[in-house]
Amino acid sequence: MSTSSENIDAVVITRPKPLLLRHAPYFIGAAIVVFLASSMQFDGYILNILMQATTFAIAVFGLSVVLGLCGQINLAQAAFFGFGAYAVGIGTTDYQLSYWLCLVAGCVMALIAGAVLGLSTLRLGGHYLAMVTISFQQIVTLVMINAIWLTKGPDGVSKIGRPSLFLSSQSYLAFCVAMLALVGYIVWHLPETRLGRAMRAVRDNELAAGVNGIDVFRTKVYAFAISAVLGGLGGGLFAGGFAYISPDQFSFAESIVFLTMSLLGGVASPIGSAIGTGLLILIPEWLRFLKSVPGLYLAIYGLSVILIIRFMPDGIWGFVTAAYDRMRSSKKVAVTSAPLQLKPAATGGDMVLEVTGLSKHFGGLKAVDEVDIAVRRGGVHALIGPNGSGKTTTLNVLSGLYNATSGKVVLDGTDVTTMPPHLRAAAGLGRTFQNIRLFRSMTALENVIIGAERPGNTLTGKGDEAALTERALAALTFVGLGPRAMELISSFSYGHQRLIEIARALAANPTLLLLDEPAAGLNSTEKLELHELLKRIAAQGLTILIIDHDMTLVSEAAQHITVLNFGRRIADGESMAVLRHPDVVSAYLGTD
Amino acid sequence: MDLVLQLLFTGIGIGAVYALVALGFVLIFRATNVVNFAQGEFSMVAAYLMVVCAVDLELPYWLSFIIALAGMAVIGVIFNLGVYYPLRHRTYLPVIIATIGASILMANGVLALYGPQPQVLPGWFETPGIQLGPVYLDSQYLLIIVVTIALVIFNYWFFEHTMIGKKLQATSQDKEMASLLGISVSTMIMITFIYSAVLGGLAGLLVAPILFVSIQMGSTIALKAFAATIIGGFGDVAGAIIGGLALGIIETFGAAYISVPYKDGFAFLVLVLFLVFRPQGIFGERVAEKA
């Protein structure tokens, strides 16, 4: 690797300034906009458009969290919007309750509905979520129309109240703009928080997120619930702004409008959401004549969705930022971090991993059958066998991606047999995948930070941004990629992507590292580098369980070998003895 | 008891329609791993084609039927080329969003062309029905049930006993392997879309004389059909049919004994119960992504 020192930018990862100071420009800008909204004289028509754009944008921000950040679909945003609107509408008219109470109640109702919907569906695939949210949307519409005693049915609710503080339309608009600015701030910074990173990881690669200690299901439920709350908030503000609501404003068609706004502007960012919302509120106003034909508008929306997905999947804002990113070359990072420390935990006995009688059956196929493996602390243990012998299945059962049919897995004294992947990661298990699984939309550094964030990692100090970054940089430097930390995954070669995956696992300071065919697809130089890397890892006392086909690598690196064939263990013991074992020789070379 | 038998008959008739649409869902899902959210609109578009031919242009009923189904085959081709095929290498999320876009486009395109007024389509037979003991068998319901049975048999024969059916199965199980064996995967996917569009269209033509022909009929049928596939077990052909029938019966009894305005809500309730307690459905196995 040639890194001439002059293109190293020495101040790339600086100590962050205090958060308030860094973000002051945003708040000053927001304050100016709120002031303008409250003081400029708009006529009623402009005021209505601004009010609609502001309240809709909050709901669309919700979509940018669930769809953009977390990759989960929500086709019921109009229903959640309706929860907020009806809470404020019915509450302030029929029950004469305080506006604030109603607004909060609407958000809470949206939250509960979103959480229940998410909890029942998010364990399943994305198709289920799409269909269930559509169904939910239809049910909510049915109730709004038919439960006349509560919602006044198709007539809608009128004379909806506002808080006494913001009685005039102008001041209420300023209040809505202030709320929008606040929500925008939160959504803007969410991706850099722990939760936001987890959401992006889930979106990019669920399996990798799980084995790196992220609770995939909970992350999705959070994203979905946040989206629902923002829908409810937008709806509550909307009801106060327009003083009249009716069921058709919260129909499935409106959910599609929200979706189109989000996709058009760019689903990944609140700026995109704001652009999309603004455009799709303004364009129909300019093209009013189209409204004379019923259906034509939505037909155009439908067509736009197809075209955006095909030609501009990242929306307008994504398009702009991608062009900007191309112009700006990635900065090199001057590595000043301390060398990577590995301090594998040692609470159990002499054996880090004890697997007894492990079986995994797929229907009638016994992919893994009554396998025992004992991995000694501080060594390199290899699991080998011909293709289809059950090695990768074993690793998947060990890391919790498959449930064991029977048997027991004890990691460092803790029985992890029934734990999901993220809890096994928390218990100290790290792994890499045969087919590399990195978070493709993130930089190398962000990938490794997610590793470092593993619950139970004792080497990240307070766990704040600075400590995590330092730990991640140290891990990248350890595998030789420190200077390229800020580059996106797609700019790395295959071999380097493997190294990043290993760095991600190392940053987590695991007790046991599972490597699934790390040498596969590497050229001979890269294999030598990998061998060196394994030696350096083992030198720090980290136990490794490695699967590989490269016999040179296995025989030189591993002190202990377990051999599988047809899902059964056929040999186990000290490397050289195992490799000479007649059963092993015949399994690999055949018998004559 | 008489009422129960009568409701059972009606439920099976409606359920058969859901089963046909669900079958279309499952076939596309198996071929492409994508749920086509515009499947219900195929039924709606076919019903409108039928109204145009049989009512507006006063063509013979059988000829209109054939024209409508041929039209659906063309729409299947356009749908594949315009919506699915360009996105085939992307993840499932963009693809389902595109099919949702297509569903909105189809429903509102028809609305813009034909207007919001629901249309009436006469049934195939002059005779309204026959009285069999205590149960009145409506001729259109009988037709639906007979056609569904015939189609299920045809479907079995087509996939198990014809070369093209076996090629389709091979494609749905492993696209790479299928293409290595000289099967044209893109042709197979095209055939699947045509077949599904025609199936969905057929369901629409059969159910149209019972319901009004309206813009909403597509999304209503699609929701029921999707619920049917989950109840039966996702991706399972027999499950889709059983699930569809079960849903039709549940819904009919629910409307008779519990509430008419919330009739369309029962499917959702049953769906949620299944998702919570038995997400793999009656027949299905839980599908896990391979590591």
Image (cartoon, coloured by chain):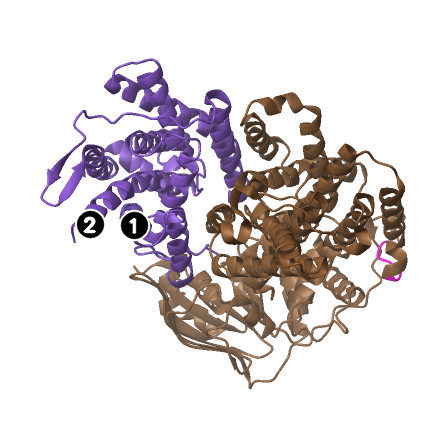
Where disc 2 sits, the SS reads helix
Q: Residue furthest left?
A: B133
**Number of dots carrying numbers:** 2
Quarter where residue A591 is shown: bottom left
Q: Residue furthest bottom?
A: A349
State the mark number for residue B256. Answer: 1
The quadrant the C terminus of chain A occupies is bottom left
Residue B229 location, x and y as percent? Answer: 35, 48
In this rendering, would A76 be left or right of A456?
left
Which stretch is magenta?
A: A12-18
Q: Which residue is mark 2?
A: B3
Q: Tag 1: residue type?
A: Ala
In this view of the protein, can residue A492 be seen by the observer?
no
Q: Colour of chain A?
A: brown
Q: Are marks 2 and 1 in contact (CB under 8 Å)?
A: yes
Q: Colour of chain B?
A: purple
Q: Are marks 2 and 1 on the same chain?
A: yes
Q: Residue at x 64, y 61 (%)?
A: A105
Mark 2 surroundings: few (<14), some (14-19) or many (≥20) residues within 10 A: few
State the mark number for residue A568. Answer: none
Q: Relative to residue A295, is residue A202 depicted above or below?
A: below
Q: Tag 2: residue type?
A: Leu
Where disc 1 sits, the SS reads helix
**Distance between the alpha carbons at the discs numbered 2 and 1:** 10 Å
Mark 1 surroundings: few (<14), some (14-19) or many (≥20) residues within 10 A: some
Quarter where residue A297 is shown: top right
Q: Residue at x 58, y 33 (%)?
A: A305
Observer-nearest of A585 and A181: A181
